[in-house]
Image: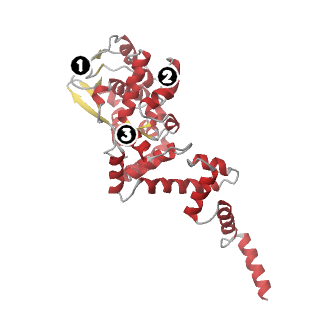
Amino acid sequence: MTSFLPIVRSATLEGFPALARELGLDAPALLRQAGLVPRSLMNPDTPLAAEAVGRLLEDSAKASGRSDFGLRLAARRRFESLGPVSLLLKEQASVGHALETLLRYLRLINPSLVTRVVHRGSRVFIEEDLRHEGAESSPQSMELALGVMLRILRELLGPHWRPLAVQFRHPPPEEVAAHQRFFGSPVVFRASFNAIAMRPADLQARPQGGDPGLARLVRHMLDGALASEQGTDKVVRQLVVALLPGGGCTAQLVARHLGVDRRTLHRYLAAQGLNFSRVLQSVRRDLVRAHLAQAQLPLSESAVLLGFASQSAFAYWFRTQFGCSVSRWRQEQTTSRLVQPGSASAAGLDRTARQTSG
C-alpha cells in the first residue's frame, strides 16, 4: 500500500462489532460517526483511514466507560488475521528471526505502524509508533497495537509467556489493573517510548508450531507483493469494491474513508494519470464480467452489487460501456467459447462447412 495514505487493513477491527454488542454499544452508529462504512469490515483487506479507526476506538472507550477497550479488542484478534505472514512466522529458526520477518512485511499488514526491535542493556524492547495525524490523541490505538504484539509473541513463545514490562507514552487511565492483567506484567505510563520489554533469551527460542511445506510458497507470494506495492489506484479500487453494493460510492465517500479530502484524492490519482471516474468504471467493468459469467445471477442483483439504483440504469450503463445489451453480450460470449479452435463445437462447424462446400 502507499506510504502517503495513513491506512490500516480492516482486519485491525476484527471482533469490533461483537465487542461493541457485548458492551451495549451500537457498532454501526459508532462506525458512521467515525466516518467509516459498516460494510467495509466484511473484507479484512479493505483499507481504512488510520485516523478514523483511532476516533472509533476513542469514541467506543468513552461510550462504554472501558478504558481498556483497545486491549479488549486485541484479545479478540486471531493470529491468522495477519494473513499469509502468520504462516511464515512460525517457520523461522528463532523468535528473533520471526520478528525480523514480521518487520519486513509489516507495511503489507499495517502501513501506519512503525515497529523496531532495540537492544538496551539486559533487555530487548519491541518499540511501536503510529505515524498518522492524531495518533498522539488516540491512546486506544497504541494499546491495541501493543496488545496485538503481545498476542503475536504468545503465539510464538507459548500462551503463558509474559513480558518483563510494558510501557506507554500516554498518561495512565484512572484504573490500570485491567492493563496489568492483560499483559501479565508491570505497565508504565508517561514513558519516553511505547514498547514491550523482553529477555534476550526469548529471541533465541524456536517458534511453536508451523507447516514447513507452506513457508517457501508464502515467502514467494509476499516478496511479490512487496515488489509490486499497491499504489493509490489499487487502494481506491479496493475501497470501491467494498463500497459499491447498495450505491453511494462517490469520490467524496472514498476520500473520507481514507482520511483525506476529495481534492487530495484527485491529486494523487492524477499523479498516476487517472481520475476517480476512470477507476470506478474500470472496477465496474471487471465486476460485471465476473457477474455475468454466472448465468444464475439475476440482472437485478448485479445492478445492486454494482451500485446502480435500478436495473434500467444498469442496462443503460452496460450499453455505453460494451456497445450492446447484456443479453447480446452473453450470447456473443457463449458463441465465442463454442467456436474456439480445437473445441468439439469448432470441429463440428468445420465438418459442416466442408460438407457444404463439397
**Residue at which label 1 appears:** 190
- The answer to whether any part of residue 101 appears in the image is no
Q: What residue type is labelled 3?
A: Ile
Identify the residue position indicated by label 3 in the image: 7
Choose top left, top right, bottom left or bottom right for residue 327: bottom right
Q: Check if mark 3's residue and mark 1's residue have beta carbons within 8 Å.
A: no
User: Percent position (x, y) of residue 42?
Assistant: 53, 37
Instruction: Identify the residue under disc 2.
Output: 20
Q: Is residue 83 above or below residue 357?
A: above
Mark 1 and mark 2: Cα distance apart in space? 28 Å
Q: Where does residue 20 sit, x and y in percent of width and height?
A: 49, 22
Distance between mark 2 and mark 3 Cα atoms: 22 Å
**Is 224 positioned to the left or the right of 326 in the image?**
left
Give the mark nearer the N terminus: 2 vs 3.
3
Relative horizontal placement of residue 301, taking residue 240 as reference (left or right): right
Q: Which of marks 1 and 2 is in front?
A: 2
x 45%, y 57%: residue: 278
User: Could you tell me which residue is drawn at 66 percent across and 52 percent down?
Assistant: 299
**Of pointers 3 and 1, the one earlier in the residue sequence:** 3
Q: What residue type is labelled 2?
A: Ala
Is 281 in front, or is 77?
A: 281
Residue found at the far bottom of this picture: 358
Q: Spatial distance from mark 3 to mark 1, Cα to Cα?
A: 26 Å
* Residue type at the position of mark 1: Arg
Q: Considering depth in this image, is 223 or 230 the residue closer to the camera?
A: 230
